[in-house]
Image (tube, rainbow, N blue to C red):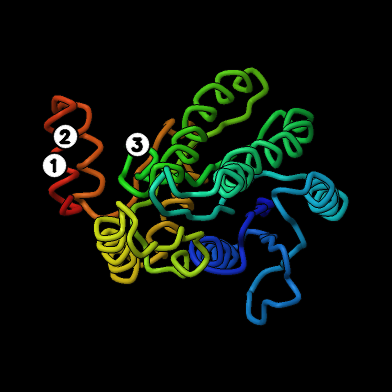
Amino acid sequence: MSKIILITGGSSGIGKSIGEFLIHKGFIVYGTSRNPENVTKTTFSLLTLDVKNVDSIQNAVQYVIKKEGRIDVLINNAGVGITGPIEEIPTNEMRNNFETNFFGPIEVMKAVLPKMREQKSGLIINITSIAGYMGLPYRGIYSASKGALEIVTEALRMETKQFGIEITNIAPGDFATNIAAGRYHAPVIKGSAYESAYGNTLAEMNTHVDSGSNPIEMAQAVYTIINTPKPKIHYKVGAFMQKFSIVLKRVLPDKIYEKMLMNHYKL
């Protein structure tokens, strides 16, 4: 029996790559988008879902359950970037980022868990970020929101194991997607104390995304996890040095690691 997959944020980038890969592997895939009517090309069904709107989450989840009778795998992929000096990012933009990257995925998990408990099976894969393992300059809010989702996954996984449900994280590094276009960028303010450092760091970040890995690597990783009976708690996918940076954070003294990051960003 083909597994039923629900992917949030399935209209582009990593989510779309995962959906297209899985449907070609024989899965039944439902992606989601805030505005699916604006998406022209997908090989799988797209449903309306805004992770900041609980009603739209419930409507999409119940649609899949009614049509297919089950949800086997939830891939919490919807997310948004944010950059800027923490002193200058409007607080409402910080809250918006957490609503999308942290509270949104929690609401989607809350929506699918009753059905997965009833099934006595299910897999939830939360797409986080390697940035969630460290506080990155001018990406601090993004790092915090993704790091928070990593930690919540650890807790929820223990709470739901008794029901036969598996939950895991995949932390991608930089991938060649359109995420930079969808980020909230705090403006580089002329005359600001951060003008030069933030402007240079922003240009560097955009370069990393543009030259990032192929999103098909994430799709392959997701496929492997779906076929793993007992997934690990954390997975990392990306360039070697991006993954190795997590190891270095664990073993290096804090100030040496901080200096390494500052040198990388030329701060």
Looking at this rendering, what residue extends furthest in the right direction? 66
In the rendered structure, which disc, 3 or 2, sits on the residue that comes first in sequence? Answer: 3
Circle 3 residues within 10 Å: few <14, some 14–19, many ≥20: many
Question: Relative to 151, does residue 213 appear above or below in the rendering?
Answer: below
Which residue is tagged 1?
260
Which residue is tagged 2?
257
- Under circle 2, the secondary element is helix
Is residue 45 rendered to the left or right of residue 186? right
Give residue 236's position: percent from left, percent from top: 34, 44
- Under circle 3, the secondary element is helix
Between disc 3 and disc 1, the foreground one is 1
Question: Relative to 76, does residue 42 appear above or below in the rendering?
Answer: below
Report how far apart the C-alphas of labels 1 and 2 lie in the structure.
5 Å
Q: Amino acid at mark 1?
A: Met
Is residue 52 rendered to the left or right of residue 13? right
Between disc 3 and disc 2, the foreground one is 2
Q: Is residue 75 visible?
A: no
Q: Is residue 45 visible?
A: yes
In the rendered structure, which disc, 3 or 1, sits on the residue that comes first in sequence? Answer: 3
- Under circle 1, the secondary element is helix
Q: Residue at x 45, y 46 (%)?
A: 142
Q: Amino acid at mark 3?
A: Tyr
Instruction: State which quadrant residue 143 falls in.
Output: top left
Q: Residue at x 67, y 61 (%)?
A: 31
Question: Relative to 236, does residue 47 appear above or below in the rendering?
Answer: below
Which residue is tagged 3?
133
